[in-house]
Amino acid sequence: MTQVSTPAEAAARITGRAVVEQRDLKGAVAEVMLDSGDTVIVKRGHARNATTAEAAGLRWLGEAGAVRVPEIRGNDDEWLVTELVGGGRPTHHAAERLGRGMAALHEAGAPTFGAAPPGGPGDAWIGLAPMRNVAGEDWPRWYAEHRVLPYLRGAVDEGTLAGDEAAVIERACARLPEAAGPAEPPARLHGDLWNGNVLWGAVEASLIDPAAHGGHRETDLAMLQLFGCPLLDRVLAAYQEVSPLADGWTERIGVHQLFPLLVHTVLFGRSYAGQAVAAARAVG
């Protein structure tokens, strides 16, 4: 593979179009205008498998035909090129459409908890943190073993969480079989559904940067609530109309927020540790 060093060079090689303009965005992401008149987003993977995992996740989510995700214009093991989406303000219509779409996406299902998107690597990523996709049939056990405890160990090893705090989270994991609510089939998750990965338009929202895998549908919704989302009440009401959540779901939000809070503790430090411990205490 010919090595390229800029988003413009990557876009030209992958799309076969000449580049008119490049505008750098945050991190290793750029907006590139092609001579066809199209504007694409070009993203450089931060690690091995990162672009492959993201591309596979976008395709898997898109195959459900439930929510809008950016069309992939091409990728290799270093670069990902997608269409430009979003750029609007949240509207009631778009929020309700997102809620209905998320319900349909989750109902599209996955073979198992921890199932990786077809064609994607098992060793994937959530943001900049590694995330292993290991198949499991029992959600509480799988969630504890593959979504909570790996990041708890990482935070303890780095000195971000103290031993007594880790014990609180370990006790919460032990209680998951009783605290998880009724058993549900594996849902097709976006997997990193914080508000920054929801790009709004007047008609519909688009979802970007997935950490897609098979999981519990309440995890996506809990993550959407964790960092705030415009018109969230509309999103949730529309979701419930299509696919009602099991009784007591609001009491289980902390259970599902343990995963993203511990990921953030590992990535960003002590400022998230207290939230993770508080969520674990809420489990009982």
Image (cartoon, helix red, strand yellow):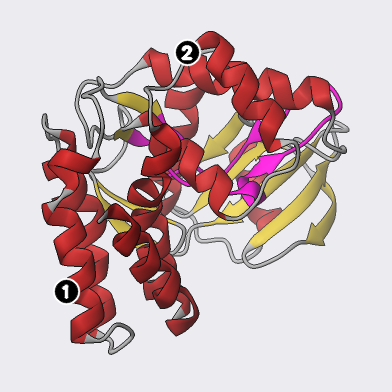
Helix, strand or loop for disc 1? helix
Q: Quadrant of residue 71?
A: top right
Tell me if label 2 and label 1 are in contact, CB under 8 Å: no
Task: Give the image location of residue 116, x and y in percent.
Answer: 27, 35
Image-based side of 214 in relation to 85, left or right: left
**Region rendered in magenta:** 189-213
Q: Main secondary structure of the magenta part?
A: loop
Q: Residue at x 24, y 38 (%)?
A: 180
Q: Specify whether 47 is left or right of 148.
A: right
Separation of residues labelled 2 and 1 (CA atoms): 36 Å
Which labelled disc corresponds to residue 193?
none
Q: Amino acid at mark 1?
A: Ala
Is 204 included in the stretch rendered in magenta?
yes
Q: Quadrant of the C terminus?
A: bottom left
Q: Which residue is mark 1?
A: 167
* Residue 134 visible in the current orientation: no
Instruction: Identify whether 278 is placed above or below 239.
Output: below
N-terminal-most mark, 2 or 1: 1
20 left or right, relative to 196? right
Residue drawn where x is 68% and y is 36% of the image: 232
Whole-percent x and y of residue 150? 20, 63
Instruction: Identify whether 148 is placed above or below 241.
Output: below
* Residue highlighted by disc 2: 243
Question: Which residue corresponds to the image point at 60% horizontal and 55% vertical from the top-left?
Answer: 227
Q: Secondary structure at mark 2?
A: loop
Q: Is residue 250 visible?
A: yes
Residue closest to the eye, 268 or 33: 268
Q: Which one is in front, 131 or 97? A: 97
What amino acid type is highlighted by mark number 2? Answer: Ser
Residue 124, x across and y down, in percent:
32, 50
Can you say whether 206 is above or below 77 in the image?
above
